[in-house]
Image: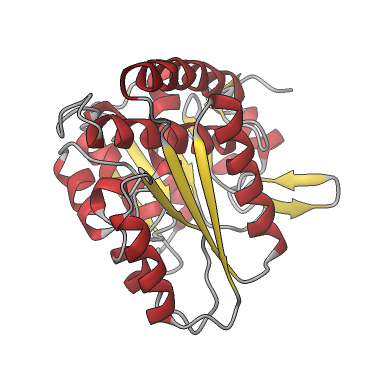
């Protein structure tokens, strides 16, 4: 029997999107320009193509402009860096997203670092990482920033809590730990070498699952009343499933995100919000320090 409160990411994302649409209208009225997100896709990975298409569609729905840039899977690192550098210099582009993963021959980090930090609306550059960890204005990594907004929306206590992040990727686990730390949580980062992982997770007031393995986190790992944020998105026989054994975990958790409908919608909503914020800064409608709450 499910006892946890469901964290409805779709509902929270919807409210963010409504606010984004209003900000877009105001920006257009004042400047005559629409915020523009450039999405760069290398290769022909079907999942990546679908994800970029969703982003382009959402831009249209909220009034943003979008620019889709595609390159073949034979693209070299320098070619991709040149494409991103050109977009960084384009005053009509306010946000840049490099869809990852990229083909193996590409140095992904070099490509990320070609993004102007002022347009890094996906929060993937060293500049953005540093700002997240120091609590400075900037752009948060979209999925972690979205999870922080879910905690805020449901008034789940973060300050003084023990948060356990399972996963240490550069675009999810590490920035999530940084954001939680900046919010005064005590943070433990777990990974494949962590000893007694179930025992560590059982101490957590907040559990963030970001390992990319379906139903990896077991229900009996969850401390009664804990908040469980599942960032997993794995293919299953009847649709997507998360990194957490949802039914079992929900019997013990106080709050839990479903998959789908939990963390996923927030990632897109934050991307749209940060693109608008980038445009507001670049067009002089917001100071460079505006928007700290998005990180």
Along the line of sight, which residue is nearer the eye, 254 or 32?
Answer: 32
What colouring method underlies this structural image? secondary structure
Q: Position of residue 294 (x, y in %)?
A: 31, 31
Residue 239 vertical placement versus 40 (above, below): above
Residue 8 vertical placement versus 113 (above, below): above
| Numbered disc total | 0
Q: Position of residue 279 (x, y in %)?
A: 32, 34
Rendered image quadrant of residue 182:
top left
Q: Position of residue 258 (x, y in %)?
A: 64, 32
Rendered image quadrant of residue 170:
bottom left
Rendered image quadrant of residue 263:
top right
Q: Residue at x 58, y 38 (%)?
A: 264
Q: Residue at x 46, y 67 (%)?
A: 192
Q: Position of residue 218 (x, y in %)?
A: 61, 46
Along the line of sight, which residue is nearer the eye, 177 or 40?
Answer: 40
Asked whether residue 136 is in view, the answer is yes
Residue reaching furthest front? 32
Q: Residue at x 49, y 24 (%)?
A: 225
Asked whether residue 229 is in view, the answer is no
> Horizontally, is 255 left or right of 207 in the view?
right
Q: Residue at x 38, y 25 (%)?
A: 32
Quadrant occupied by the C terminus = top left
Residue 136 vertical placement versus 73 (above, below): above
Quadrant occupied by the N terminus = top right
Along the line of sight, which residue is nearer the eye, 32 or 113?
Answer: 32
Along the line of sight, which residue is nearer the eye, 250 or 243?
Answer: 243
């Amino acid at each position: 029997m499910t006892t946890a409160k469901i964290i409805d990411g779709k509902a929270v994302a919807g409210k963010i999107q409504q606010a984004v649409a209003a900000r877009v209208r105001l920006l257009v009225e004042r400047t005559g320009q629409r915020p523009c997100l450039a999405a760069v896709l290398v290769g022909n990975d079907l999942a990546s193509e679908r994800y970029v298409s969703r982003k382009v569609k959402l831009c249209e729905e909220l009034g943003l402009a979008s620019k889709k840039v595609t390159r073949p899977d034979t693209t070299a690192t320098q070619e991709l860096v040149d494409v991103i550098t050109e977009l960084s210099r384009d005053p009509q582009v306010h946000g840049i997203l490099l869809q990852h993963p990229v083909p193996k021959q590409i140095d992904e980090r070099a490509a990320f670092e070609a993004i102007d930090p002022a347009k890094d609306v996906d929060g993937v550059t060293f500049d953005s990482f540093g700002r997240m960890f120091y609590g400075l204005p900037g752009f948060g990594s979209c999925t972690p920033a979205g999870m922080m907004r879910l905690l805020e929306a449901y008034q789940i206590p973060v300050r003084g809590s023990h948060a356990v992040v399972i996963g240490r990727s550069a675009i999810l686990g590490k920035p999530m730990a940084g954001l939680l730390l900046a919010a005064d949580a005590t943070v433990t980062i777990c990974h494949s070498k962590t000893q007694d992982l179930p025992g560590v997770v059982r101490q957590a007031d907040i559990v963030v699952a970001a390992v990319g393995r379906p139903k990896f986190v077991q229900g009996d790992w969850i401390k009664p009343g804990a908040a469980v944020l599942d960032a997993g998105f794995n293919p299953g026989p009847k649709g997507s499933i998360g990194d957490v054994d949802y039914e079992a975990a929900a019997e013990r958790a106080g709050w839990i995100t479903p998959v789908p409908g939990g963390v996923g919608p927030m990632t897109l909503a934050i991307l749209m919000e940060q693109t608008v914020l980038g445009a507001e800064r670049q067009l002089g409608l917001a100071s460079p320090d505006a928007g700290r709450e998005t990180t």
